[in-house]
Amino acid sequence: MYRIVRKKVLNPTVKLIEVEAPYVARKAEPGQFIILRVNEKGERIPLTVADFDREKGTVTIIFQKVGKTTKLLGTLEEGDLILDFVGPLGKPTHLEGVKKAVVIGGGLGTAIAYPQAKKLYSLGAEVDIIAGFRNKDLIILEEELAKVCHRLFITTDDGSNGTKGFVSDILKELLDQGNRYDLAIAIGPLVMMKVVSNLTRPYGIKTIVSMNPIMIDGTGMCGGCRITVGGTTKFACVDGPDFDGHQVDFDEAIRRQSMYREEEKRSMEEHECKLGGGNNA
Amino acid sequence: MPNMSPNKVRMPEQEPELRNKNFNEVALGYTEQMAMEEAQRCLNCVNRPCVAGCPVNVQIPDFIKLIAEGKFEEAYWKIRETNNLPAICGRVCPQETQCEKVCIRARRGEPVGIGRLERFAADWYMANAKENSGKADGKAEKKNRKVAVIGSGPAGLTCAADLARVGYSVTIFEAFHDAGGVLIYGIPEFRLPKEIVREEVDTIKKLGVEIKTNMVIGKTLTLDELRKEGYEAIFIGTGAGLPSFLGIPGENLNGVYSANEFLTRVNLMKAYRFPEYDTPIKVGRRVAVIGAGNVAMDAARCAKRLGAEKVCIVYRRSEAEMPARQEEVHHAKEEGIEFKLLTNPIRVLGTDNGWVKGLKCIEMELGEPDSSGRRRPIAKAGTEHVIDVDNVIVAIGQTPNPLIASTTAGLETQKWGGIIVDEETCATSLEGVFAGGDAVTGAATVILAMGAGKKAAASIDKYLSQKAD
């Protein structure tokens, strides 16, 4: 069992929890992920490591309420226990030797991009961060991000804060202005990563994207997380989760992500139905 | 007087039309009466060929004699002298190619139902004696020396149990959240109830074995770090967990599963009880399972139970070459699984939305024997055809997971991933590191893995005893 030692609500749908998991904390690096299972009947879900503290033996994850499991996870409070928490899984991101980088986060992806930016910045790279959100209420980690970059650009889809538009609009502007990067890291919805990869491709900027497909074990056993990269099948859990954005077949990944949409809906409905019943009783 | 009936006493089973709609165990086991009757078919012959036919050398005629005499608990303990997982072996061992194959009674009629009797003894013990048995596993004097076992499948459990019995402090590291390896994630409930696996794992824990779950060795901890934590010897029993795919177009369409993923969702994650359990599974009206081993049969029978109307096995060779146990094939056929033999898949066809809609195949004929000794299938020109399906499950084999080998300098492996060991001692290329089971051989059987675990335990004991001198 793994204890939640800290919880912070970042926006109406995104929460941060810091979990006691000494073995994971000892090894975790930016880019890696963990798999957790909230309770006996729960699903195993992968979540990217947002931060870690080797001395305290804790790992921080940031998650958005998208289905039953993340909803349930969000109801847990400090002191509560998570049944299973395994990792660190996947390969760490290689960030050494980068001189100038642009780190792009979309929505929750910003939380995952944050440790990457932090590490790049600490390694002495010049870092620009572009973080995009749907509206001002959903902005997360603004202060933290500001501390680990040279320039921070915030966008909102509706213009309620920062620049109105998408992260890709800012990126395009920066590229048009003549900014050149030796690395772009894009983390967020698949569509966003696809658009960013298409933007950087003509400039030959190496672009790393972080894939988060459906998976069970996270150790290469099920093959559920397979994606096509450069025409060959890769397992995101062991070969990734980072991949060359110019090589990833995003359309296939988007399709595979939708495989259980009906079931996810049903699971959520049953869950809410039960909660409703409980309240009425 | 021995019972000279040429046939085994029939074991009751759930009727096919009933059982292909539920996940309850298919074979129901012998009653005391049936077991004693079957036990009397053993001639207690002088040569005891069955004992040599058993990879863990269960003293078969001795335990069977005890059953014939109605001494069921004693029969159980007789098996336990060499076999730590009797309730499991009695269910999933391929007795027909091992102990029963060489049974003297098989020369005229059916062999003694050794597997059924083993299962009976173990089940009887669990139901009647486990709680209040005066006898228990003997506790050896503690040696205060630590051994790490990686993987809690049949090889790891056996190795750990044997080492604990002679006094080592054994810790098993398991990547999943539950112990049992393939017994938990792979073999379905209707063939091996998970409650039975849990009971057997508990028995091993009672020997003093500690099991740490959620530990992915190679990631959470490396082999070197295990040594630094004071483990003087390490056994790698990580199985063959890497699914093979065909490499044909359309394999990444929605609705294509590896057998590993399909079975893990069903067995470990209990997707057959969705939405009570959260993990979903997608089974359409028509399902094709590619391959004809035990894993393929398991996947096909699960698909049927999950509501598929038509389930077919697609296999490029003929019935004679199918690697699955005859009993599994027989059960599958009874349950309405179709067999499309001499049929080779060449492409998975998809809808515009990217979901499976068919499997394009070509007919095959058998030519000369290939390197495996089986006749090579050759495509027949102009016989391409499409089988309409909603799901494709790829069950063409598994290879060892490279996670440990890739993070351990100096651990030698075969090209296909199997860890290289000395056959006599299970020793790997690294001192103090041993390996056995599917991680070495590639996908094989539960009992062969147990045999390897046993052999490794003996040589680990020898290695550590000599090291102490």
Image: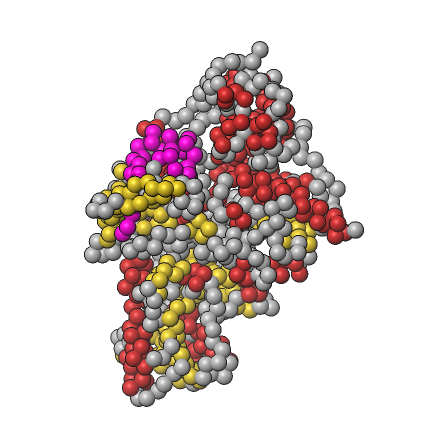
Q: Check the image and tell me how it is coloured.
A: secondary structure
In the rendering, at what x and y percent does residue B163 appear? 66, 44
Looking at the image, the residue that sits furthest to the right is B469
Looking at the image, the residue that sits furthest to the bottom is A177
Give the mark count.
0
Task: From the viewer's side, name the closer residue of B63 and A86.
Answer: B63
Residue at x 36% of width, y 42% of height: B368
Looking at the image, the residue that sits furthest to the top is B1
Image side of residue A5 versus residue B304, left or right: right
Q: Is residue B410 magenta?
A: no
Image vertical order of residue B252 relative to residue B127, above or below: below
Task: From the viewer's side, name the closer residue of A102 and A13.
Answer: A102
Residue at x 28% of width, y 55% of height: B250
Q: Quadrant of residue B303?
A: top left
Task: From the viewer's side, name the closer residue of B24 and A235.
Answer: A235
Looking at the image, the residue that sits furthest to the front is B368
Residue at x 31% of width, y 77% of height: A201
Is residue A144 at all visible to an observer of this figure?
no
Residue at x 63% of width, y 45% of height: B424
In the rendering, at what x and y percent does residue B366 appear? 33, 40
Image side of residue B298 versus residue A84, left or right: left
* Quadrant of the image containing the C terminus of chain A: top left
Q: Is residue B341 magenta?
A: yes
Q: Quadrant of residue A131?
A: bottom left
Q: Which residues are magenta?
A: B319-347
Is residue B204 at all visible to an observer of this figure?
yes
Image side of residue B370 versus residue B248, left or right: right
In the rendering, at what x and y percent does residue B123 appear? 54, 28
Image side of residue A38 versus residue A246, left or right: right
